[in-house]
């Protein structure tokens, strides 16, 4: 029984990290209708920026903040320079995927070039070392921290999107860009800002995941495939769908490793295929 | 339009003469190796583009069919000897076509990004199985020492075999593309609703194109198994699907020979760049970025540009 509970908590923290990445991916798709294939690379950048900052200023929290801001800035700049040129082009969808695919190739190799191919580690801050002990169950403090941050971000995002003026503009832009533009909003800047915020979430997830997993140049690709599955499960562009999808994938992986260790990595794909067969637009879709 | 048709004939003649003459110029083994890979990847990209270039459906899982062709040929030849090589290439194509009917039933109900991601998921699933199922597929080690078919067992005679098969396959794809069926596919790319209103079934046409595309992708995969005599699960990996998409865009997705030209540029570049630097992905990423931004119609659009300059 204890093992199930600790496995469940572990799955929950993985789910929250996935949610941070996937919610960014979903936000970009929902608002700007961009499919950002390179989202995992911003996660990767987040890990490395945090690593670099912490090796200069040995403070975990500064690393977390610079990773978030750094990934967000790079994302906003890339959107501003490159992605903007594709809006409204024939075959826009495939070209977006290709452009962001080229971002993956460039960013992942740039990371390898700057920081080298070997493993890097980030140490947890002292305050989050150790575990909470309840009876015979050990719950790592760091996992609890990740879960709390994940929930906090979800609540904050819900509040901003639904209760503030900025959120209203973002939601309106996702419905009708031209109309919002006519009302005097600089839609182009809204797109850049949304892209930046979304990639910042990816960077934050990367920095938070770094103490749990080792930091390697290949991490971005693993994450993007997992978070793709998450958003497709929940329905692209659906914020709460991303949360549900992340919970499913996080827990399935956590328990899959217990029961069928060798095939656990294939379970996510199997689930995605099953869901798409029965609900092609994701679990949270209304029609079909 | 007339000019266009004449251009296509010239394309076929140039294609055949360039690759045929290579065999008689007493080339090195390395040159033939590169040329073989260009032909095989060119066929793969042309087959891929039968779906993407016409209907606009972007499959990110075509490596599945390529890998399937390579593994069927490789595994059977390894167990039963080189005599079965050529039949296995075709059997690989047929099995791949059957698999693609099943996948098409599921994937083609979706469009846009969802189609792209589901095809990616299936290919990754097969990649995962190939790596994990060590006893059957050889896992991460891949399969080495695949013999070439008798009569075509030297690198140069095998090149001739590849040239013949690729030439015939591309001719068949060309016939499909310029048939009324191909016209309908192009119509689907421009306006699927209109095709439905004309009384034609969009789904069935896409499925048929998907199956033909899978068949020829597997033929290319089967031929690939004999070039180096070794195959690896990475033939199924998503970077393989990404590579073939890049070749297509680079060459030009709207023209028939675009993918072949893209494959030529890609493979020669790869050969040159990999000897200079280990950051091959970075270079290819920059090329791809520039192609998407500046040359969305591919290198082949430069030819039109030159033609227009000459006329004025």
Image: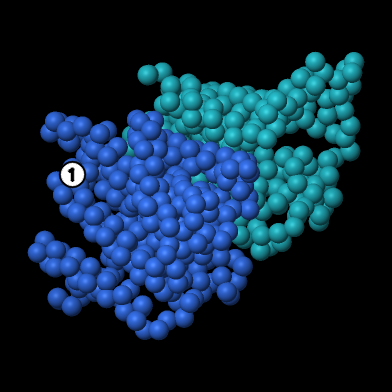
Q: Is residue B266 left or right of residue B17?
A: right
* Image coords of residue A146 (percent x, y): 73, 31
What is chain A's hue in the picture? cyan
User: What residue sits 68% from the left and 35% below the top?
Assistant: A262
* Image coords of residue B286 (percent x, y): 49, 63
Under circle 1, the secondary element is helix
* Res. A198 image quadrant: top right
Q: In this orientation, which residue lies closer to the viewer: A176 or A237?
A: A237
Q: Is residue A115 left or right of residue B76?
A: right
What is chain B's hue in the picture? blue
- The chain letter under disc 1 is B
Can residue B74 be seen here? The reply is no
Q: Is residue B172 left or right of residue A49?
A: left
* Res. B4 image quadrant: bottom left
User: What residue sits 41% from the left and 51% below the top?
Assistant: B88
Can residue B103 be seen here? The reply is yes
Q: In this orientation, which residue lies closer to the viewer: A183 or A12?
A: A12
Q: In this orientation, which residue lies closer to the viewer: B245 or B209?
A: B209
User: What residue sits 89% from the left and 32% below the top?
Assistant: A130
Categorize mark 1 by other alpha carbons within 10 Å: few (<14), some (14-19), many (20+): some
Q: Compared with residue B233, is residue A22 higher up or lower down, i.e. above or below? A: above
User: What residue sits 42% from the left and 81% below the top?
Assistant: B27
Q: Compared with residue B56, is residue A12 higher up or lower down, i.e. above or below? A: above
Q: Which coloring applies here?
A: by chain
Which image quadrant: the C terminus of chain B? bottom left
In the picture of the structure, the residue carrying the numbered disc 1 is: B181
Q: Is residue A56 left or right of residue B22?
A: right
Q: Compared with residue B253, is residue B150 higher up or lower down, i.e. above or below? A: below
């Amino acid at each position: 029984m204890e093992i199930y509970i600790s496995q469940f908590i572990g799955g929950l923290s993985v789910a929250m990290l996935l949610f941070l990445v996937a919610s960014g991916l979903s936000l970009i798709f929902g608002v700007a209708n961009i499919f950002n294939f390179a989202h995992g690379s911003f996660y990767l950048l987040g890990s490395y920026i945090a690593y670099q900052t912490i090796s200069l200023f040995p403070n975990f929290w500064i690393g977390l903040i610079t990773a978030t801001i750094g990934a967000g800035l790079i994302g906003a700049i890339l959107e501003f320079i490159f992605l903007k040129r594709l809006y409204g082009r024939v075959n826009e969808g495939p070209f977006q995927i290709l452009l962001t695919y080229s971002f993956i190739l460039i960013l992942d190799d740039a990371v390898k070039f700057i920081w080298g191919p070997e493993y890097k580690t980030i140490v947890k801050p002292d305050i989050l070392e150790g575990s909470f002990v309840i009876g015979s169950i050990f719950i790592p403090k760091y996992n609890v921290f990740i879960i709390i941050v994940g929930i906090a971000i979800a609540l904050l995002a819900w509040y901003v999107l639904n209760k503030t003026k900025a959120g209203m503009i973002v939601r309106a832009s996702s419905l009708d860009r031209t109309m919002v533009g006519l009302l005097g909003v600089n839609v182009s800047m809204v797109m850049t800002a949304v892209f930046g915020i979304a990639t910042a979430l990816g960077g934050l997830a990367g920095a938070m995941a770094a103490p749990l997993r080792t930091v390697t140049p290949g991490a971005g690709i693993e994450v993007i495939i997992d978070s793709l599955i998450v958003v497709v499960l929940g329905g692209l562009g659906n914020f709460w769908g991303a949360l549900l999808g992340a919970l499913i994938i996080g827990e399935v992986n956590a328990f899959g490793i217990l029961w069928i260790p060798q095939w656990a990595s294939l379970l996510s794909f199997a689930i995605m295929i099953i869901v798409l067969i029965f609900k092609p637009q994701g679990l949270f879709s209304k029609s079909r | 339009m007339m000019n266009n048709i004449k251009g296509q004939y010239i394309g076929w003649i140039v294609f055949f003469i360039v690759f045929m003459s290579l065999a008689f110029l007493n080339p090195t083994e390395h040159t033939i190796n590169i040329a073989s890979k260009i032909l095989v990847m060119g066929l793969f990209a042309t087959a891929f583009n039968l779906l993407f270039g016409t209907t606009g459906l972007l499959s990110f899982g075509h490596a599945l069919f390529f890998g399937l062709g390579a593994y069927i040929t490789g595994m059977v030849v390894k167990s039963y000897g080189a005599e079965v090589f050529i039949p296995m290439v075709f059997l690989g194509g047929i099995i791949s076509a059957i698999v693609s009917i099943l996948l098409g039933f599921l994937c083609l109900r979706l469009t846009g990004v969802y189609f792209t991601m589901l095809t990616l998921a299936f290919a990754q699933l097969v990649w995962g199985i190939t790596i994990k199922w060590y006893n059957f597929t050889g896992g991460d080690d891949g399969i080495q020492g695949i013999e070439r078919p008798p009569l075509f067992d030297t690198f140069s005679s095998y090149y001739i075999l590849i040239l013949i098969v690729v030439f015939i396959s591309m001719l068949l794809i060309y016939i499909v593309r310029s048939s009324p069926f191909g016209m309908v596919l192009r119509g689907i790319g421009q306006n699927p609703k209109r095709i439905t209103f004309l009384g034609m079934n969009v789904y069935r046409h896409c499925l048929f194109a998907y199956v033909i595309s899978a068949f020829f992708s597997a033929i290319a995969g089967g031929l690939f198994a004999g070039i180096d005599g070794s195959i690896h699960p990475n033939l199924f990996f998503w970077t393989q699907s990404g590579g073939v998409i890049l070749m297509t865009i680079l060459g030009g997705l709207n023209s028939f020979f675009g993918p072949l030209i893209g494959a030529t540029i890609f493979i020669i570049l790869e050969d040159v760049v990999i000897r200079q630097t280990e950051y091959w992905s970075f270079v290819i990423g920059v090329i791809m970025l520039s192609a998407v931004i500046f040359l969305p119609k591919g290198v082949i659009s430069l030819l039109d540009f030159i033609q227009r300059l000459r006329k004025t």
